[in-house]
Structures are given as C-alpha cells and as structure tokens.
C-alpha cells in the first residue's frame, strides 16, 4: 500500500464566567452572610465579589481582549443573518444538488512528505432517500515539503460510489436511510435533530468533542468545519452554527481578507498544539468557503507557517450526474 493510500484511509475512513454567573456568586455569598455578624460579613462578601470579578477578568484576558471577541461575534453574526435571509432554493424533482470539495492533505513517508490534491463530487437527488453518487479523483497536485518523488507516489485511480441516502458503504442489517449520522457524516436524521438554538448547539458541540483532539476549543471548530464542509447543512443550521462558534473564547479573526481556491473571505481560527485551524467564510453572503490548517511550529522537517491541509466546497443544482 502506498503512502498516499494510507493517508487517504486516515483522512476519509468508511464556559467562561459571565454576568449571570457573577450575580449568582454574589447572591450565594450574600445569602450565607445573613447568618453572620452584619458588618464583618458584608465586608467579606464585598471582597469575595471583587475576587470573583477579578477571576472572571483573568479568565477573559487569558484568551483575547474584548474588542477581538466583539469583532468575531460581529463577523459571524453578519454571516448568520445573510444565511437566515437567503435560504437554499429547493432542488426540483429529477435534479441534483451537486457538491464539489477540493482538498489538499498531507502524505508522510520515510523519505518524503508532501501535500496532495483530491476532488470529491457528490450528487444528491431531489429526493434524498434516492440514490446518491460520489466520485473521488486524485487531481495530481503534489507539493513536496520534505524529500522528493518516490516509487510509491503514484496517482490514485478515480473511484465512483453509489448508495441510497448517501450510504456508500452499507452495513448488513442497517437501513441506509435510518443511520444516525454525526458531525463528520451528517445524515438527514442527524441534521433534523440538531437544535437551531446557538447556545444549546454550542453546548452539544462541547459535549460531543469532550476528550477528543488536542485542544477543546479547537476541536469544536474542527467538528463544526466537518459538518459545514459536507455541503449538507441547510441555511438555518449554518446560521445557528455560525452564532454558536461566536461563543468560542479562543476564536479570533486570523485574516480579514484571504483567498482560498480562488474565493475571497474572512478567516477565523484558533491556535493550539502547534497548529492554526481556520474556517473561511464570506461575511457578506454567509457562504462557507472552506477550512485550512497551518503549522505554527516546526514539525517533522516542515517549517512553521506551512499550510498542511485545506479544503473548499461549492454547490449548485444540476440536471444530471456526471
């Protein structure tokens, strides 16, 4: 098995204190104080409240200044409003939602490490319970970051899969249209069950990313990007997800204007564990352009600042498959 095959198998396998919290803390302190000597206890309560406020300020400063958080919230709010006001047009009977994802990923070998390109095309019928088609194509793009071409670096043959409800690898005894789904593979039932309330959606992301990844905030962003990249989330859910991401304390605007695969947008990201993970959106239209990973520290001979992964997604309605 080539390094590229191994890389493909790995990549594509079948709250902070807020005003309410401070009020609650103050209420608890004052409630306990009523059974004590008034003057001493009120003084102690005042000190306790000041400590709580100072602690909250320390937590907030540990991430980013308020101005940066406001800018993130404003950018994501604009994108969410645009999505809410412009829902997706329905796919007419007999036609398909055509989703194209272009990705650049890393392959690591004993003598070389390189970025390679893949193109995924998915045709979703107007009736999502019908047969979906997906085609995977190696674009032939290669960028060697360590070493050079070797005998195992061969271009993969195109592959095409078909399956009801997007289940390209059905399991015995499992109804393809009743699969539960997840953030990486959002089925119709998974999408329908997700709340559109941003705070509850954020809390769900926190729960389901707990214990995964190398940084809790960054992993929330990764899961959200996985779902957005699928091209299967409706506009109201994309809007809710943008607003949920605004609750991430570590999220910042990393580039106000950036270009990914020829599309211009704003990059928002989180730096952790030697990487800067980003999503790129168009704040005017609310379109999700894609995602990108850049090293912030040298790794395995690859210098800091190098892009080690990216993907972009576009979709439109088409008449036929192919």
Image (spheres, rainbow, N blue to C red):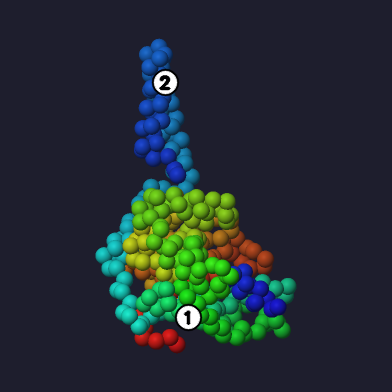
User: Looking at the picture, how far across and down is residue 78, in whole percent?
Assistant: 31, 61
In terms of depth relative to the viewer, which is nearer, 261 or 304? Answer: 261
Looking at the figure, which quarter contains the C terminus?
A: bottom left
* Res 160 label: none
User: Looking at the picture, how far across and down is residue 39, in whole percent?
Assistant: 38, 14
Q: Residue furthest left?
A: 85
Task: Using a 10 Å C-alpha cutoff, classify the residue at mark 1 as few (fewer than 14 neighbours), some (14 to 19) or many (20 or more).
Answer: many
Residue placed at 57% from the left, 70% from the top?
Answer: 171
* Res 32 label: 2
User: Looking at the picture, how far across and down is residue 277, in whole percent?
Assistant: 51, 62
Q: Nearer the viewer, mark 1 or mark 2?
A: 1
- Is residue 122 among the parts visible in the rendering? no
Distance from Cα at disc 1 to Cα at disc 2: 64 Å
Residue placed at 56% from the left, 68% from the top?
Answer: 173
The first of marks 1 and 2 along the sequence is: 2
Residue 240 relative to residue 9: left or right: left
- Is residue 223 among the parts visible in the rendering? yes
Note whether 74 is above or below 49 in the view shown.
Answer: below
Residue placed at 61% from the left, 83% from the top?
Answer: 156
Task: Using a 10 Å C-alpha cutoff, classify the residue at mark 2 as few (fewer than 14 neighbours), some (14 to 19) or many (20 or more).
Answer: few
Note whether 199 is above or below 149 in the view shown.
Answer: above
Residue placed at 33% from the left, 77% from the top?
Answer: 91
Label 1: state its secondary structure: strand
Q: Residue furthest right?
A: 110
Query: Residue under circle 1?
Result: 133
Label 2: state its secondary structure: helix
Note whether 142 is above or below 276 in the view shown.
Answer: below
């Amino acid at each position: 098995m080539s390094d590229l095959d191994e890389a493909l198998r790995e990549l594509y396998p079948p709250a902070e204190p807020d005003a309410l919290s401070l009020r609650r803390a103050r209420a608890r302190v004052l409630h306990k104080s009523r059974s004590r000597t008034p003057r001493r206890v009120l003084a102690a309560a005042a000190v306790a409240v000041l400590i709580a406020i100072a602690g909250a300020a320390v937590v907030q400063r540990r991430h980013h200044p308020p101005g940066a958080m406001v800018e993130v919230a404003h950018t994501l709010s604009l994108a969410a409003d645009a999505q809410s006001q412009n829902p997706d047009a329905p796919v007419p009977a007999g036609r398909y939602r055509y989703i194209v994802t272009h990705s650049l990923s890393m392959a690591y070998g004993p003598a070389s490490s390189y970025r390679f390109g893949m193109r995924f095309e998915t045709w979703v019928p107007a009736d999502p319970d019908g047969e979906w088609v997906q085609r995977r194509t190696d674009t032939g793009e290669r960028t060697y970051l360590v070493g050079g071409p070797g005998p195992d670096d061969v271009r993969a043959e195109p592959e095409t899969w078909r399956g009801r409800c997007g289940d390209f690898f059905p399991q015995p005894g499992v109804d393809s249209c009743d699969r539960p789904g997840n953030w990486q593979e959002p089925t119709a039932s998974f999408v329908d069950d997700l709340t559109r309330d941003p705070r509850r959606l954020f809390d769900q992301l926190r729960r389901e990313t707990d214990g995964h990844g190398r940084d809790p905030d960054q992993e929330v962003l990764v899961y959200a990007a996985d779902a957005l990249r699928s091209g299967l989330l409706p506009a109201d859910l994309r809007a809710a997800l943008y607003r949920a991401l605004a609750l991430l304390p570590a999220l910042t605007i990393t580039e106000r204007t950036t270009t990914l695969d020829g599309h211009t947008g704003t990059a928002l990201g989180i730096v952790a564990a030697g990487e800067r993970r980003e999503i790129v959106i168009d704040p005017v239209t609310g379109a999700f352009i894609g995602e990108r990973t850049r090293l912030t520290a040298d790794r395995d001979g690859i210098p800091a600042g190098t892009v080690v992964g990216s993907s972009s997604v576009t979709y439109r309605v088409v008449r036929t498959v192919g």
